[in-house]
């Protein structure tokens, strides 16, 4: 009976996770000016821990299981056929005390692709939760492999576990940071079932390292609620997917920096590093650049980010520094620089001037905090119509209806007063 | 009086009628040239009641790129996890005083005080200081609710490129727990965000006419492309409901100012003469 219960809950979780995959599945709404027209559909790998006693707290919740099962069926039916979803489990075997074998226990139940709903349902239901090892680090690596490496795709792993990794090394958080830095646009959302302190620390570390979220659940109802919450949010997000392009800024200077067109980029920046990029700007264009440095590790309380635009020979064009403090997910700075139009001719590529962009930071951390890979940088480069850089001279002239009204009023009152004065004095003269 | 003899009969009436017409002409045109009000240009929002929810709740994103898209003057309620970073975005126009009012319904069973903060960013991710409101508050472990709010400065139609003044475009709201005990992470949190936008987007006749932003601060949302040497990218056309560059505004720029000033002088002269005629010979007007 207990085994059946566990299996059913596992199946329910699997289904909810599959639904989460919808998040990225709907094709991005194309916005002619802003939007990506042909972004590949995002991929999601759902990772379910079968190793532990994650259903322990669920004492005889038959109706909850039924509800989970019902949700499973509903969500699976509603899953759009273009969703790219995979399923992986870990700790599924029963190797007993053999750590070497137990720490290899991870298996792909369904490859990442258009889901075979019936097969996935059967595959999840067939899994038996065990009391084996928990190789989270290895599983994350395998899950990332499941998601492939073609560029321009956004990837998401949703990891549900009830216990911390029992197989380190590799440390799962280090693995997560490594994967996030590999330029795969990979995010890991974690959900802890009845998490203890160690599990919580590990899962929050994984989530922070990849820019994902951490959620906890303490019983079946909460689990259902929280996964539904993740699913709901993922589904809403589906219409707008931006996949940044990975680029490597030059730490040496502007001369050998990559040439960037408008768009969103990802990079990594180590402490004390300056990253340079070049943007060709035409007369009549305004360059807008923003940089967000993700805080994916424990850093000292105060920090700042500076973005600077200079000419190739080092003249300042614009700069912006912003400082932050405390626990935060990132620190941003942004600038604008307009290049005045030359005449009425449409500028050609040869008229472009190179603008050097530099992103620098002031982050500090304790000695134990890893320095490499660097912190994630999200860089936005945009070229729009130029605005006037300085206020126009008004030459002391006025404008507007109030201005006109005041002039008219003063004129009228002046005329009336003068008229009465004239009348008064001419009357006096006549009287004399 | 020699000057009074210059204008008689019909001439007097013509002059005063001209002056009156010049003044009257202004009245209806005020409405025509003012910046459109946000209510009229709210885009998909439709109905214009302040603070009304638009029906469906907009769920938060976890970064600038995935921010939940809202309209100004709407509100939303969502559940999230404590310690999560929540992002929403909304469009705002020049002349508006926008603000984000946040009510957090906190989970029970927390172990320590938590500090919550709301931040507002403009379209190029520049942090905007809160001119009004209390953006940060600490909830004690027993508190069931905490309220924070932030209203940046009035949005300007134009600013110098080097200044970080708020400009029309997309605005971001971020809600975060800046100090939280590790044990209190991941718990269920209910968030209510209410966006308000006071001011009708008309900040006077000078708004955006001498100087105006040619493209609102609406960020690009596509992946970038590395260029080859010698290549240059096209200018991106940026659009936003209700945004007016002021280029085609009636009598814009310095030329416009000359016209306004000269016209003002002519009107003043005509009205001055009419006033003089009226005061000097009132009986001629009531014959």
Image: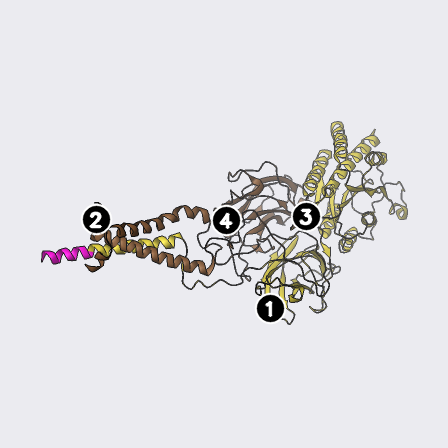
Chain colours: A yellow, B brown
- Which chain contains the residue that carries disc 4? B
Report which residue position mark 4 lands on.
Answer: B96
- Tell me the tag on residue A316: 1
Would residue A227 be seen by someone viewing this image from the given angle?
yes
Query: What is the total number of numbered labels drawn onto the structure image?
Result: 4
Q: Confirm whether the magenta stretch covers residue A425.
A: yes
Work out which residue is located at the far front of the displayed protein and give it.
B10
- Same chain for the residues at labels 3 and 4, yes or no? yes
Report which residue position mark 3 lands on.
Answer: B182
**Quadrant position of residue A351:** bottom right
Start-end of magenta stretch: A421-432
- Same chain for the residues at labels 1 and 3, yes or no? no
Mark nearer the viewer, 3 or 4: 4
- Same chain for the residues at labels 2 and 1, yes or no? no
Mark nearer the viewer, 1 or 3: 1
- Evaluate if marks 3 and 4 touch, with contact meaning CB atoms under 8 Å apart: no
- Secondary element at tag 4: loop
Q: CA distance from mark 1 to mark 4?
A: 32 Å
Would residue A47 be seen by someone viewing this image from the given angle?
no
Front residue (pair B203, B69) = B203
- Which chain contains the residue that carries disc 2? B
- Evaluate if marks 2 and 4 touch, with contact meaning CB atoms under 8 Å apart: no
């Amino acid at each position: 009976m207990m085994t059946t219960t566990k299996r059913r809950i596992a199946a329910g979780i699997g289904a909810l996770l599959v639904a989460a995959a919808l998040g990225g599945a709907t094709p991005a709404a194309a916005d002619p000016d802003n939007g990506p027209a042909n972004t590949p559909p995002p991929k999601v790998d759902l990772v379910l821990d079968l190793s532990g006693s994650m259903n322990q707290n669920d004492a005889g919740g038959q109706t909850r299981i039924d509800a989970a099962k019902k949700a499973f069926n509903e969500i699976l039916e509603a899953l759009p056929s273009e969703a790219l979803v995979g399923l992986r489990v870990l700790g599924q075997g029963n190797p007993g005390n053999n750590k070497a074998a137990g720490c290899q226990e991870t298996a792909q139940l369904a490859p990442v692709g258009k889901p075979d709903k019936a097969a996935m349902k059967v595959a999840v239901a067939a899994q038996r939760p065990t009391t084996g090892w928990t190789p989270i680090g290895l599983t994350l690596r395998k899950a990332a492999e499941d998601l492939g490496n073609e560029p321009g795709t956004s990837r998401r792993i949703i990891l549900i576990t009830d216990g911390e990794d029992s197989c380190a090394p590799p440390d799962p958080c280090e693995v997560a940071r490594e994967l996030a830095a590999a330029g795969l646009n990979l995010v890991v959302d974690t959900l802890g079932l009845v998490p203890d302190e160690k599990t919580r620390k590990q899962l929050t570390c994984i989530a922070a390292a990849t820019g994902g979220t951490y959620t906890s659940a303490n019983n079946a109802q909460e689990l259902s609620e929280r996964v539904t919450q993740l699913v709901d949010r993922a589904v809403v997000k589906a219409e707008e997917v931006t996949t940044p392009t990975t680029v490597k800024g030059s730490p040496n200077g502007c001369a050998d920096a990559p040439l960037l067109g408008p768009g969103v980029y990802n990079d990594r920046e180590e402490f004390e590093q300056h990253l340079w990029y070049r943007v060709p700007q035409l007369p009549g264009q305004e360059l807008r650049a923003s940089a967000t440095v993700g805080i994916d590790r424990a850093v000292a309380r105060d920090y700042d980010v500076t973005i600077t635009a200079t000419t190739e020979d080092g003249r300042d064009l614009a700069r912006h520094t912003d400082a932050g403090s405390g626990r935060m997910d990132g620190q941003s700075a942004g600038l604008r620089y307009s290049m005045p139009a030359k005449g009425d001719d449409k500028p050609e590529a040869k008229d472009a001037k190179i603008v050097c962009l530099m992103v620098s930071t002031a982050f500090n951390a304790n000695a134990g905090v890893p320095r490499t890979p660097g912190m994630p940088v999200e860089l936005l480069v945009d070229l729009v119509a130029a605005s006037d850089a300085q206020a126009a001279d008004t030459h002391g002239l006025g404008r507007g209806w109030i201005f006109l009204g005041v002039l008219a009023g003063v004129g009228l009152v002046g005329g009336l007063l003068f008229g009465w004065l004239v009348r008064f004095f001419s009357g006096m003269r006549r009287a004399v | 009086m020699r000057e009074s003899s210059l204008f008689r009969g019909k001439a007097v009436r013509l002059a005063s009628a001209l002056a009156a017409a010049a003044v009257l002409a202004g009245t209806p045109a005020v409405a025509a040239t003012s910046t459109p009000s946000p209510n009229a240009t709210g885009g998909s929002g439709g109905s214009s009641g302040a603070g009304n929810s638009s029906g469906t709740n907009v769920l938060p994103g976890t970064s600038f790129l995935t921010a939940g898209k809202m309209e100004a003057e709407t509100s939303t309620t969502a559940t999230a996890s404590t310690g999560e970073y929540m992002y929403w975005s909304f469009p705002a126009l020049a002349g508006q005083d926008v603000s984000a009012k946040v009510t957090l319904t906190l989970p029970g069973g927390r172990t320590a005080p938590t500090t919550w903060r709301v931040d507002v960013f403009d379209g190029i991710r520049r942090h905007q200081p809160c001119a009004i409101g209390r953006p940060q508050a600490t909830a004690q472990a027993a508190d069931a609710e905490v309220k924070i709010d932030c209203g940046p400065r009035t949005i300007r139609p134009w600013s110098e490129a080097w200044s970080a003044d708020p400009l029309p475009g997309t605005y971001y709201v971020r809600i975060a727990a800046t100090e939280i005990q590790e044990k209190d992470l991941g718990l269920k949190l209910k968030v209510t965000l209410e966006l308000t936008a006071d001011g009708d987007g008309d900040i006077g006749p000078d708004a955006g006419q001498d100087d105006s932003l040619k493209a609102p601060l609406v960020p690009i949302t596509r992946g970038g492309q590395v260029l080859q040497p010698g290549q240059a990218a096209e200018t991106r056309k940026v659009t936003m409901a209700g945004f007016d560059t002021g280029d085609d505004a009636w009598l814009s720029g310095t030329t416009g100012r000359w016209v306004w000033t000269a016209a003002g002088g002519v009107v003043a002269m005509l009205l001055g003469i009419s006033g003089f005629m009226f005061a000097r010979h009132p009986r001629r007007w009531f014959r």
